[in-house]
Image: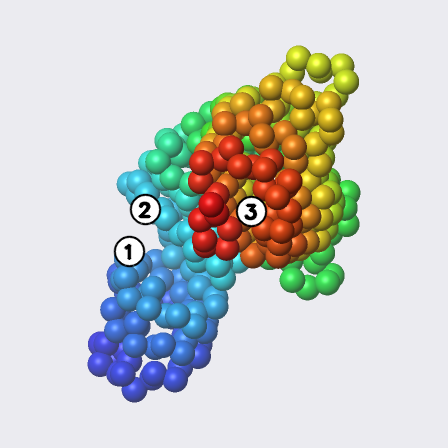
């Protein structure tokens, strides 16, 4: 490897680097000089022990593949953090043999055609010491799952924060139908003790898996870029411990009403979102109506702890629901919501409905 150490500076335009059957114990730090590198493939390098931080300088790197490097021999490895490595197509199968591993922040689900070569969710069952209290556990490319039976997630009581990322199917032939997409979501059932959940780029229309009603301890929920969803589940009655809710980029949602609150006629005394403190709506392109019926507006049991409401880049939203005046809302931030902002500024009657809120900020200006 002396050759590489001395000559990396002459290979600055290299696009592909294959290191196979080498005896290196560490990838040379000089690799950071290969700023145009797209593919780095390390194969059968049995003595490899360390990657330098300079690998992170490869801003154009698209594929990093480590195969046949006896990763399973790192029997004392405690922490493996690979978050934000968006080009990863899978994690080495050998990770399943790292019996002392305590921290793993990302699981990449490989394509069906490559599943035999990479780590699976089932392989994680062998990792008895795996703990998640101090980190976010993100499952990326969930859309590649081929087994719709319940995953191992439901047995991980120590899992605190879970992000289910369905991104990754860019080719038309890889895009699943509605039944498959929802089946995968159902299969990814977490343990009821989960505290924070994120669902991103889910391509189905149904966002209401059966297991959601069992998340009694959930305090935070982020639903992001689920562009095919046209309505929201009855979260107000499903998640009694929820303190933060973020809805971002649900392009097809045009109306939000009592269904989100989860209140029916037979639930006259029920409290919707009993612990919700922060609520945010962002980038809702087609959202026009946020309704609260007369029956809803008379309730004192709707968001009784709401403190902050943020609405941003929801250009077609016309008005705010009447039940907000019965909440203890302290801060209302409205940004890039043209129709709503104009309505509040021009209509004294509509502004009166929110005048009880101590801090109102519209497009960066505090309303008086």
Tell me the SS state at disc 3: strand
Could you tell me how far apart the alpha carbons at marks 2 and 1 are, in whole angstroms? Answer: 8 Å
Give 148 or 27, whichever is nearer the viewer. Answer: 148
For marks 2 and 1 on the same chain, the one whose residue lies earlier in the sequence: 1
15 is higher (above) or lower (below) than 99:
below
Q: Quadrant of the N terminus?
A: bottom left
Asked which quadrant contains residue 13, the reply is: bottom left
> In this figure, which residue is indicated by the disc labeled 2?
74
**Foreground of the two, 266 or 3:** 266
Q: Position of residue 107 (x, y in %)?
A: 49, 46
Eyeballing the image, is 149 above or below 45?
A: above
Q: Nearer the viewer, mark 3 or mark 1?
A: 3
Q: Is residue 225 above or below residue 148?
A: below
Q: Residues within 10 Å of mark 2 (few under 14, many from 20)?
A: some
Kindly report the distance in space between the C-alpha atoms of the residues bearing marks 2 and 3.
48 Å
**Residue positioned most to the front:** 348
Mark 3 or mark 1: which comes first in sequence?
Answer: 1
Q: Residue at x 34, y 64 (%)?
A: 56
Secondary structure under the numbered disc 1 in the rendered image: loop
CB-based contact (under 8 Å), mark 2 and mark 1: yes
Query: Residue 215's x, y, as percent?
Result: 56, 25
How far apart are the alpha carbons under marks 3 and 1?
Answer: 49 Å
Q: Nearer the viewer, mark 2 or mark 3?
A: 3
Count neighbours of disc 1 (C-alpha within 10 A) and say few if under 14, some if 14 to 19, many if 20 or more: some
Question: In the rendering, at what x and y percent does residue 300 appear?
Answer: 60, 19
Give x and y (percent) for residue 61.
43, 70
Label 3 sits on residue: 311
At a point 65% along the width and 62% down the height, the residue shown is: 170
335 sits left or right of 131 in the view: right
- The reply to whether residue 79 is visible in this rendering is yes
Badge 3: residue crowd in 10 Å (few <14, some 14–19, many ≥20): many
Q: Which residue is mark 1?
A: 49
């Amino acid at each position: 490897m002396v050759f590489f150490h001395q000559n990396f500076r002459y290979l600055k335009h290299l696009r592909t680097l294959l290191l196979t059957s080498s005896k290196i114990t560490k990838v040379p730090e000089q690799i950071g000089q290969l700023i145009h590198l797209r593919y780095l493939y390390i194969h059968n390098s049995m003595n490899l022990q360390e990657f330098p931080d300079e690998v992170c300088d490869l801003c154009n790197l698209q594929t990093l593949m480590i195969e046949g490097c006896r990763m399973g021999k790192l029997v004392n490895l405690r922490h493996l953090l690979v978050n934000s490595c968006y080009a990863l197509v899978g994690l080495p199968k050998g990770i399943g043999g790292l019996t002392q591993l305590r921290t793993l922040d990302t699981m990449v689900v490989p394509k069906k055609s490559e599943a035999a070569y990479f780590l699976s969710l089932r392989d994680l069952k062998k990792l008895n010491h795996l703990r998640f209290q101090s980190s976010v556990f993100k499952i990326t490319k969930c859309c590649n799952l081929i087994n719709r039976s319940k995953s191992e997630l439901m047995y991980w009581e120590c899992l605190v924060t879970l992000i289910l990322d369905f991104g990754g199917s860019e080719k038309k032939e890889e895009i699943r139908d509605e039944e498959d997409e929802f089946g995968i979501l159902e299969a990814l059932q977490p343990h009821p003790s989960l505290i924070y959940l994120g669902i991103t780029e889910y391509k189905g229309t149904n966002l209401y898996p059966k297991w959601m009603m069992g998340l009694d301890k959930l305090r935070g929920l982020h639903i992001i870029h689920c562009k095919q969803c046209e309505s929201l589940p009855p979260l107000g009655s499903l998640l009694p411990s929820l303190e933060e809710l973020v809805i971002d980029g649900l392009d097809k949602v045009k109306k939000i009403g009592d269904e989100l609150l989860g209140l029916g006629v037979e639930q006259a005394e029920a409290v919707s979102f009993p612990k919700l403190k922060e609520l945010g709506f962002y980038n809702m392109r087609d959202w026009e109506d946020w309704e609260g019926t007369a029956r809803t507006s008379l309730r004192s049991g709707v968001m009784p702890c709401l403190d902050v409401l943020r609405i941003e880049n929801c250009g077609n939203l016309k008005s705010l629901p009447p039940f907000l005046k019965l909440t203890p809302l302290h801060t209302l931030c409205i940004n890039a919501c043209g129709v709503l902002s104009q309505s509040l500024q021009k209509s004294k009657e509509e502004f009166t409905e929110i005048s009880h809120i101590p801090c109102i900020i519209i497009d960066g200006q505090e309303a008086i």
